[in-house]
Image (cartoon, rainbow, N blue to C red):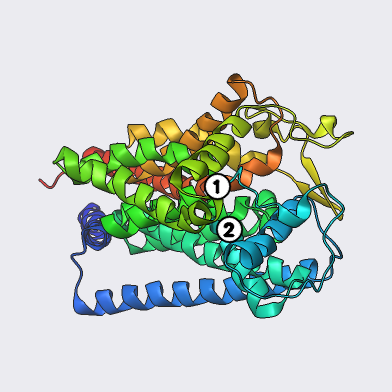
Amino acid sequence: MTRISIHKYFYLTRDVCFLHYTRLCNSAAGKFNNGERRAYMRLRWIALAAVVVVAAVYVYYTYTQFAGLQGYVSDETWYAPAAYNILTQVFGYNESMSYPYPNASGISTYLNLEHPPLVKYILALSIAALGYYPLAWRLPGWIVGGAAVVLAYLTGYELLRDRGEAAAVLAGAISAVALIFDPNFWALHGIAMLDAYAGFFALLALYLLVSERRLASSIALGLAFAAKETTFPLLLPYLYYIGELEDKPLKRLTYAVFIPAAVYVALSAPLMVYLGGPVAWFKDSFLHMMSWDVTSGHIAGNAESQISTPWGWFLDIHPFYLGQNLYARVNVAVMWLWAILTPVAVLLKDKKLVIAALFPWSMWAGLAAAYALGNTTLFSFYVADFSPMVDVFAGSAVVAALAAWDERGRRSRRRGSPSRV
């Protein structure tokens, strides 16, 4: 091959590569022709359909693993009876006691006032439809688990949507897979406890926020607050990000504080009526909850070895034994990816990724603050309250970091390529 033909071959190859790169950039910017647009739309819908199918399989597999568990598992001892009592005593619904109460003092009138009411309402609806059986109080969690898998995909997709369709789909897929294999969320969504619901509604608020659906995200934040109080610290990163979308302070406060608070109060209204009014509810439920959360001792006799710390969760120290051979283990690799990639998101100046990292960090910091204020009996299953967001951030941030590294390499190669003479 002559020197001239070699040069022609080199320039042709360079031009083809540059054209391919330009198409990728146009894809990221949404500047592609009709054929490419249709192809990417097909990819988007095929991926979403695949995730829905996988989520359905996840729900079915959950059923096969948890439907046969007999009796009350872990804190189902408190939440299932509380849901039944709220159904029959607060709402006055006539539902026969088809399954015995657990052996606990005062359980026949227990309402679980030390936690918000939303999850008990959800369990109560299922009990009203199916009767007071383990299947009834666990089924809603299984559905929430499947919905969380789809939501993880949608959130990962939204976080990287501006980086191109392929990157967004990949981020969504990795996020969904990370959640499916999250051992903490798996154990907690299979039984009737509050944590998987808190994790789901917190992730929903994040997804709607980065999608810039302000009102819907504000309502979802209120639902997260009403699921479990561990989500309260989300107010701070939410207020920060809504400030990027809204210039007026009143609008920021409306979306971040007033609407979520209104949702929380509205959902608490039945308990207010039952307890004798807002003042009684505030004293017997809300203030009781705040005091409960900073007080140690919420543990049965010989379970001291299961107490863990927020920093110990990064090493899966003392995973909580839930019973029935279930442990609330932590995915250490994903937790460390979250910690390592948080500054990477800041360096990339990606506001969506930064807020996706800060949402779970705020909840972790809230639990660390509770420990510092005196509640030294924390447990590893609290991780399920924020681990869905950790899974999504880790999956999305890995793709974003690889995409940024590839982009930097492409720019470097273009700068170093010879020019035509």
Question: Which residue is at the front of the view, 132 or 359?
Answer: 132
Question: Which residue is at the front of the view, 282 or 163?
Answer: 282
> The residue tagged with tag 2: helix, strand or loop?
helix
Residue 67: which disc? none
Q: Residue at x 58, y 27 (%)?
A: 370
Q: Quickly name the residue at label 1.
A: 228
Percent x, y of residue 292: 63, 33
Question: Which residue is at the front of the view, 179 or 93?
Answer: 93
Q: Quickly name the residue at label 2.
A: 119
- Count of marks, rendered view: 2
Percent x, y of residue 352: 33, 46
Q: Residue at x 19, y 45 (%)?
A: 251
> The residue tagged with tag 1: helix, strand or loop?
loop
Check the picture and name the quadrant holding the C terminus: top left
- The kind of residue tagged 1 is Lys
Q: Residue at x 77, y 39 (%)?
A: 319
Q: Is residue 356 above or below residue 132?
A: above
Q: Is residue 238 above or below residue 266?
A: above
**Sequence order check, earlier mark of 1 and 2:** 2
